[in-house]
Amino acid sequence: MADPTHTAFFYGTLMAPAVLHRVCDGTASHNDPTRRTTPFTTAPAILHDYRRHRVEGADYPAILPTSGASVRGTYVTGLTEADMWRLDIFEGSDYERKFVKCKLLTEVGDEEGKGNVKGEEVEAETYVWVSEREDLEDREWDFREFQREKLRFWAGTDDEYEEVDEAVAAAGKDGTGGRGANGAITEALKEEQKKDEKLRNAV
């Protein structure tokens, strides 16, 4: 019998396929057929009654329940139990995985949401901020800005960004919170990936 699969709503760095695959598969490439037996499917979606905030001093956001607000993100299907376990590690103790209902978007509007056309309501799991409220900024987190200015630190290879990683470590300023190319969380995920591969090869 096949393992049960999960669905999730991602609203931050995990909307970038390279980051999602890096966490779940150990590689930023989403074209590697040897890494995944259950393919992801993604669709634009919107989550109502939550607001997205920038996390102070970090490259990533958080969401909090907020009546009347909404967050646009990505609805992902095909996530396995192992994927969710790795995602829990990646998100860390500042977040709690919760079930929510979001609406798929059949048409995506502008940044303010004008022109969005909502479709089916679906259930998904998402990561909600449970740490200190004071650690969140009031301003909105910008995915395009992240893609343009920060994604390379999250999904780059060790060789490409070795000098950058060393400079960030020396300065003590790691906006990835250990989730970047050579961060502690990433290293832990790599070790778990190696263990998984050894177990598969032993069977």
Image (cartoon, rainbow, N blue to C red):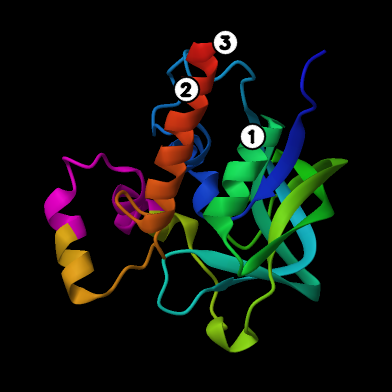
- Name the spot of residue 117 as percent of width and height, x first: 77, 44
Q: Which secondary structure, mark 3?
A: loop
The residue lying at 76 percent from left, 49 percent from top is: 125
The residue lying at 34 percent from left, 56 percent from top is: 183
The residue lying at 65 percent from left, 65 percent from top is: 95
Say which quarter of the image contains residue 39: top right
Q: How many marks?
A: 3
Within 10 Å of the Cα at label 3, are there few (<14), some (14-19), or many (20+) other Cα atoms?
A: few
3 and 1 marks in contact (CB < 8 Å): no
The residue wearing badge 1 is: 82
The residue wearing badge 2 is: 197
Looking at the rendered structure, the kind of residue marked 2 is Glu
Q: Is residue 42 above or below residue 85?
A: above
Q: Which label lies toward us, 1 or 2? A: 2
The residue lying at 53 percent from left, 36 percent from top is: 24
Which residues lie in the magenta part? 147-165
Q: Work out which quarter of the rendered image holds the N terminus and state it.
A: top right
> Foreground: 69 or 122?
122
Within 10 Å of the Cα at label 1, are there few (<14), some (14-19), or many (20+) other Cα atoms?
A: some
The residue wearing badge 3 is: 203
